[in-house]
Amino acid sequence: MPAKPSLSPDDEMKSIPIHLMKPQYPLTILFALLTAVSAQDTSGTASNSTEPTRSLIKFENTEFEISIWGKGDETILALPGNGADTTWYQFIAPRIAAAGYQFVAMNPREIGDSRGSIENLSVKVMASDVASVIKELKAEKVHLIGWAFGNRIARATAASYPDQVETVTLLAAGGLVAPSKEARDANTQVISSKNLSKERQVELYKASIFSPASDVMAILKSVPSKTWPEARAAQTAAMSKADRSDWLSGGDVNMLVVQGLDDKMAVPANGYALKKEFPERVTLADIPNAGHMLLVERPNEIAEKVISFLEANPIASGVKSE
């Protein structure tokens, strides 16, 4: 029976020096009141999006739901956050597809209409799932994008399947530097407290997952975003058991790190640490007035950064001949 969804989360991990870092259980960010995203202004925050084409890619014991925008020669494959679905990408995907790319977002096992065992799930299994989907997309190579938890799986895929991945883009790339106690406490309070006034909710959201510049109440309005608790728990457990070498480096591919300067969960120090560790491969893009929810706070700016990066790192042969 399909797993029942609950309201949307995301995750970040605790801080350990980069040379000693081992994955920890993520801090799950539950957006208890977040039911949607809507227009704020033409310069940044999410607006109405073009509906994608949806289909299932079926294997012997698994099947994966994908959403597709565009028909470009080069393919992008995007991975959502911890326990989340592809909904989050609808605000950047049409913009990037319009630049000439095929933008594909996939739901992991037991999220949306995707199916597959999540018992004893591992990072390597999730990376293998991504690699299998890439093959079915008939792409020589793809550009991977991962938001929050998804950026770790994108990096793991690039490390394990280098022949299938041209570049990796990381959105809200945490895992090295922990969020502050104040941000964690604000997030916990907005999740667990009942009967908060709208003013107090906004205050707590801005202290944790949103930028102070964002119109939070406008962002809490339109397209429902869901999460699947069983899948989320399995993903969290998988990351806790993973070795740093399974995912951190992203193999040898070029990486774009896009981070909100107001992100209090995947704090900007994470991107700076990656740039210091891999200076030749990492391109860093700081987005002002964006927090952990940068996909819905500043989609236009993110799309522009991604397009510029992809144009500078093209795939020599984007589509296999039939």
Image (cartoon, rainbow, N blue to C red):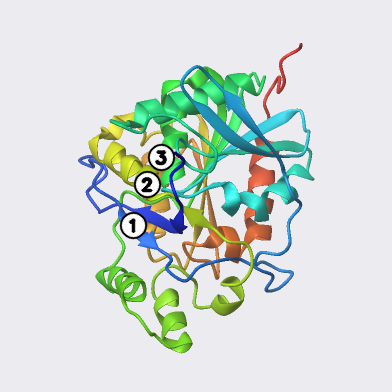
Which residue shows up at 43% across the image and 81% down it? 201
Q: What residue type is labelled 3?
A: Arg
Q: Which residue is disc 1 drawn over?
A: 28
Residue 207: x and y in percent read 39, 76
Kindly report the distance in space between the C-alpha atoms of the residues bearing marks 2 and 1. Answer: 9 Å
- Give the quadrant of residue 248: top left
Please tell me whether mark 1 sits on a helix, a strand or a loop: strand
Evaluate if marks 1 and 3 touch, with contact meaning CB atoms under 8 Å apart: no
Q: Position of residue 157 (x, y in %)?
A: 45, 28
Relative side of 73 to 115, left or right: right
Q: Which residue is drawn at 45% across and 35% down?
A: 109
Report the amino acid beneath label 2.
Answer: Arg
Structural crowding at the residue carrying mark 3, measured as other residues with C-alpha within 10 Å and reported as few (<14), some (14–19) or many (≥20): many
Q: Can residue 100 be seen in this view?
A: yes
Distance CA(mark 1)–CA(mark 3)? 15 Å
Question: Callout 2: few (<14), some (14-19), or many (20+) C-alpha neighbours within 10 Å?
Answer: many
Residue 152: numbered disc: 3
Q: Verify CB contact (< 8 Å) between mark 2 and mark 3.
A: no
Asked whether, in this view, residue 7 is left or right of residue 24, the answer is: right
Task: Please indicate whether residue 7 sits to the left or right of residue 169 in the image.
Answer: left
| First reached walking from the N terminus: tag 2 or tag 3 | 3
Whether residue 252 is visible to the viewer of this picture, yes or no, is no
